[in-house]
Image (cartoon, coloured by chain):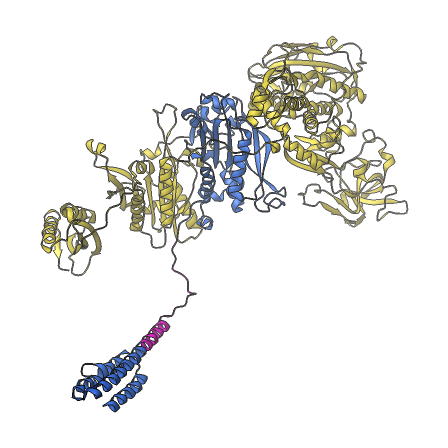
Amino acid sequence: MLVPIEWINDYIDLKDISTQEFCDRMIMSGSNLETCETLCEGIENVVVGKIEKIEPHPDADKLVICRINVGDAEAAGKDEAGLLQIVTGAPNVFEGAIVPVALHNSHIPGPFHGQPKHEGGEKIKKGKLRGVESFGMLCSAGELGFEDKVVPVAHKEGIWILDPEVHEGIEGRLGQDFAEALDLVQSVVDFEITPNRPDCLAQIGMAREAAATFDRSFEYPDIALAEEGEGSSSDHVSVEIRNTENCRRYVARIVTDVVVKQSPWWLQKRLMYAGMRPINNIVDFTNFVMLEYGQPLHAFDIREVHGGKIIVDNAAAGEKFTTLDENERTMEADMLMIKDAERSIAVAGVMGGLNSEIEEDTNTIIIESANFNGDSVRTTAKKLGLRTEASARFEKGIDPNLTEAAADRVCKLIEMTGAGRVLKGSVDVYPNPASAKTIDVRVSRINYVLGIELSREEMVKMLEGLEIKVAGEGDIMTVTPPTVRQDLLEEEDYIEEIARMYGYDQLPVTLPKGNTEAGQPYDRTLRDVAREALCGMGLNEIQTYSFVSPSGVDRIGIGEDSWERAFVRIINPLGEDTSVMRTVLTPNMMDVLARNYSRNLEEVKAFEIGNTFMENPISPEKLPDEDYALCIGMYGGDVDFFSLKGIIEELLKNLGIRNISFVAESEYGVYHPGRCARVLVEASDAMKAAGEEFEELGIMGEIHPDVAANYGMDGERVYCCELMFGAIARKADTEVVYTPLPKYPSTSRDIALLVDEEMEVGSIEKVIKQHGKAILESVRLFDVYRGKQVEEGKKSVAFTLVYRDKDKTLTDEEVAEVHEGVLEALREKLNAVLREM
Amino acid sequence: MQAQLNRILEEAKGQLEKAQDHAQLEEIRVKLLGKKGELTQILRGMGQLSPEERKETGALANKVRGEIEQLLGEKVDAVKKAAKAAQFKLEKIDVTEPGKPVNLGVKHPLTITMEEISKVFMNMGFSIVEGPEVETVFNNFDALNAGPNHPARDMTDTFYITDDVLLRTQTSPVQVRTLMKQKPPIKVISPGRCFRCDTPDATHSPMFHQIEGLVVDEGITMADLKGTLDSFAKQLFGPETKTKFRPHHFPFTEPSAEVDVSCFKCGGKGCRVCKGSGWIEILGCGMVHPNVLKVGGLDTEKYTGFAFGMGVERVAMLKYGVDDIRLFYENDMRFINQFK
C-alpha cells in the first residue's frame, strides 16, 4: 500500500514530523514498512521549456530539430534568439508544447527510454545527433523517474507534454526548475497491510492509524454536495439486488453534462505516487476515491444502461461477456453480474463491460458504489484469471457503510473541477445495514495477558484515539468499533489494540515463572547418536527434499511391483521432479553422489537421516506412515564393501544393537548381485515364537554398475546402504552395563582351514562359535588366501580363537578339549580341513 | 701396596678418559673392579699385611675403589647421554611435513543451526516434540484459527495430498497435537521440515525448516514472551544482542509480533547483512489465540500462552553469510565441509 506523505497530510497535519520519524513510529504501532522512497530525487538542471519551432533533421527521418525557449534559465548553447537547439526522436512533440528540458550538464533519475535502469541515474551532456548539435534532451516521465505503469495516458508514449489546462499558469514558468514547478520530490511510504486490516488499504485508513499513533486530530474529506443538476438520481435509474447474499449494498448516483478531460495535476500526481496511471477525469476520480476510502467504484454511460435499470444478479451459465480489457469471457452461474434491463454490463466487483464504457462524448453517467461479498468476488476473479485493484479490495472485505460517502466523494470531485452536474440524492439499496459489534472487554484481562498495569482511563484514551466508542464502568469497557474495523470482534482483538498503542517496546521483560524439564523423544535421541557416530567415522551429513521424482526408483533399478513404488502423491506439485513423497532415500543419495562426482570430487562419504512415506489405508487421520530411514553413500578413496560394512557394524554397536548378521542378496536390482547383503538382527522373542529367526534392518552393497551408469558414474564403484530407522529404534538399547574386566589370562589358537571357494566366512564363524562353548571368548578372521599351495576352487581362511574362563586359569588340557571339538565340527559339518600353519 | 693402589687410580682415570662407549667402560670395570680385577687382587693380598698396615691400606683401597666407581658411574652416564643425543639426531623429523589426515565428518549446516537453537531452548526448560510432515488440513489450518478462505490454503500456496491432507506449511500443527494430548504446563519446541509452493531461487525453497515454540501455563504474559525471546536472542547471537518487537498479524496469535534482533554482523550500526537498518527480522510470535487453546479443551480464562516460530534456513544464511538457499539442498561436499 503506497502512501504519499503529502496525501496523508490532507487529513492530519504531520508537516512537523520527519519521514524517518513517521516511518519508525508507524512501524511500532503496527503498520509494517516495506520501503520508504523519495520519488524524483536526483533531477538536476532540468527546466520547463517551450518548443518554439520544429524542423526536420537533414540526415535522419526519425529525428527532428527543436528550438526551445527556456526563459531566463542559464543554459549552454543558447543562440542569438536565446533559444536552445535540441534534437529529439520523440513522436509526440509539436510547436508550442511545454516540456521538461534537461540542459547540458544535467542529471535525471532515468532510465533512458528503452534502456535498463542504472543506479545513480543518468548524466546529460551536449552532443551531436547525426551531425546536428543538441544542447540537452527533452524528457519523458519515465526518464524523470516515474514507473511506466503510472505515466498518464496523455503522454504515455513520448515526451512529457504539459497541458496548460492541467498545469495552470505553466506558460509563465518557462526556465524554472521542472521538479520545483511541478512539486515532484515527494516521499512515498510502502506499507505491508496484513490481511486483518483491509481498512488500511486506504489513505484515510492510514491517516486514522497515524492520528492514533501521533495522538493528533483527524478530518474526513469534505463531501457536502451542491447537487445543482436537474432532478434526482432516482429519476434516471432504479436498482434491484436479486442476490442479497453477495451484494450487501448498492448506491447509484447520476451526474449529467459530464466533461471528459484530463484531471487536475494535483490529483494526477496523487494517483501517480500511489501507483496508478491517470487516464481521464472520471476514471481518475473513481480511482482516487478507491485509494482514498478503499471503496472501489465504477462509472457507466447511462446511454448503455438499458431501461435505466441496474440489476445485481448471477450470470447465466455459459454467458459470453466482454470486459473493459476487450477480452471475451465465459461466465459461470455463480458469478455475480451487474445487468441492465436486457443484458450484463459489468462483472460485479471485478471489471466493467466494454459495452457500457465511458466515451469521449458521454454526457450522463451512473456512479456505482457497491458492496460485494469478498468470497464471491475472489472466486469469480480467480476463475476468470482477472485480478484487479477492485477485486483485490473486495476479496479482503470492505465496510458496507463506506459506499455512500465514497459515491458522494466522487461527486464532490466532479463538482470541484466542473466536470459535470450532480443530481440530487442517490439510489441506495441496503437491505441489511451493517452494524458494529459491541462487546465487553475487561481492563483486568488486558493487563493480565500483557503483564502490565494500565488504568481504565489510559486504555479508554487509546481506544478512542482509534475511533472506538467506550461505555460501561469499572473493569468492564463496553466497546463499539467503527464499522470499517471488521477485525475487532473479540476481547483479544482489543488486547492487541492496547498493546500496540501502549507500545510493544514499553511492555516489561520477564521470564515464565513455572519450571519445566527439557526432554526429547527417544527416537530423536537415537538419530542424534547415529549422526554423531557417522560424523565421527568421517561421513558428512546431507539433507535432501522429502518430495522426489517418481522416476528415481527406476533409475536405481527398483523392480516393477516393489513396495518402493507405492508413492504418496502430491496433487499440485511444482513439477514432476517433486511430485511424490520419497519411499527410500537412495535415489536422492545417488543424485548427491553424482552431483559431487560430476564436480570432480574424488572421494565422498555421506549419509542422510530422513523421513520416508508410505500409504497407510487404515490410518484414522488418513495420513501416510512416516518412518525415518538412514542412507549412507560413498565412492572414491579406499572405500569398499567392507569399509561400508565396518561403518554399519560400528554404528549399530553404538546404538546397542548386538547379534547382527549380513546375508548375501543377489536379487535386489539396486546392487551388484555378488556384492550385496541384507542386514539382519536376531528377532525378538515374540517374532521368534512366530517362526521368524531374523528381523531385517536394511540392505547394503556395491551399487549395480548399470545404476551407477544411470547417474553418469560409469566405472566408479559406489557403495550405499539404506537402513530402516524405525526397526533400528525398536532394537536399539543405549543402556550401558559394565562387565567386570577379566581376572584370568586367555589362551589363543590360530587355525588355517582349507574350504571350498563358495564357503562363507560367516558360516565357519557360526560353527566355531557353536562349538567353542562357554570358554570361547572371540573368533577373528585374519587371513583369506588363494593361490599357490591351495588347490583350484578352494581357499584358505585363517582365524584366531581366544579362550578364557572368567573364574580360573585354563589348563592346556581344558583348551585342547574344546578346541579339538571345534576342529572336529568344522571338519564334519563344513568339510573344512586344518592346514599346517 | 699403597703406591700400587695410587697407580691403579691414575691408570683408571686415564683409561676412563679415553673410553668411548658402553663396551669399553664395561671392560674397564671388569679389569679393575671385577672378581679377577686388579683392585680385587690387591684387597685379597691384604691378609698378609700387619694390622696397622692393613687398616691404612684398607682405607686407601676403599677410597680408590670409591673414586673409581664414581668416575665410572659418571662416565657411564655421559656415554649414555651421548648415545641418546646421537639417536635423537638420527631420528630428527621435519615437523613441517603434513599431518596424516584424520577426517571427522560434518553435520549438515541446517542440523547444526537447529541443534544450536534447540539447545538454547532446552536450557530454558523446553522439550522437543515432533510431528508428521504430511498433516491434516485440520491440524495445519482449521485448528490454528486460519479462516476457510485464508489465502495460505490455496493450491498455489500449499501442497495437497487429498482435500483433507497436505504437506504441512509450518510446524505449528505439532503445537496442535501437543495441546490435544498434554496438559499445562506446556513448554515445547518443534523443529522440522515445512513445505510451500515456492519455485526455488536464491531466497526461496519449496521445502524449508522451522523451529516453533509453545508455552502454555497459568499466568503467562506477553512480557514473558518478550523475556523468553530476548534471552534466546542473547544466547544465540551474543549477550550484546538487542531485540525489537513490532506489531504484526498471524491468525493463531493475538496480539502478534515480529521480532528483529540487532544486527550481529555490525552490532546495529548498519551494514549489508541488515541492509543498513541495524536490525534483522528473525522470528514471528504472539500470544496464543484462545480459539487455538480451545482445541486442547483448555480453560482460556485460566491458561494463557505464547508461541513463536523462526525459519532455520534464514538463521543459517544470516549466521554463515550463505547467499543462496539452494546450496543447502545441493549437498556439494565443498560446501558442507566448511561447517567443521
Q: Residue furthest front?
A: B52
Instruction: Name the spot of residue A378 as percent of width and height, x first.
Output: 57, 22
In the image, is residue A735 above or below residue A470? Answer: below
Residue A103 part of the magenta-drawn span: no
A65 on left or right of A517:
right
Observer-nearest of A461 and A184: A461
- Dividing the picture into quadrants, the one containing residue A459 is top right
Q: Residue furthest right?
A: A80
A449 on left or right of A398:
left
Residue B98 part of the magenta-drawn span: yes
In the image, is residue A668 above or below residue B334? Answer: above
Count every numbered label the image shows and give the total. Answer: 0
Can the viewer see residue B186? Answer: yes
Instruction: Name the spot of residue A592 as percent of width and height, x first.
Output: 41, 45
A114 on left or right of A728:
right
Instruction: Name the spot of residue A493 as percent of width and height, x first.
Output: 58, 22
Instruction: Name the spot of residue B318 as percent of width and height, x first.
Output: 54, 43
Q: Residue at x 76, y 45 (%)?
A: A107
Q: Assign the N terminus of chain B to one quadrant of the image.
A: bottom left
- Dividing the picture into quadrants, the one containing residue A93 is top right
Which range of residues does the magenta coloring cover?
B77-102
Q: Colour of chain B?
A: blue
Observer-nearest of A729 and A475: A475
Question: Which chain does the yellow colour mark?
Answer: A
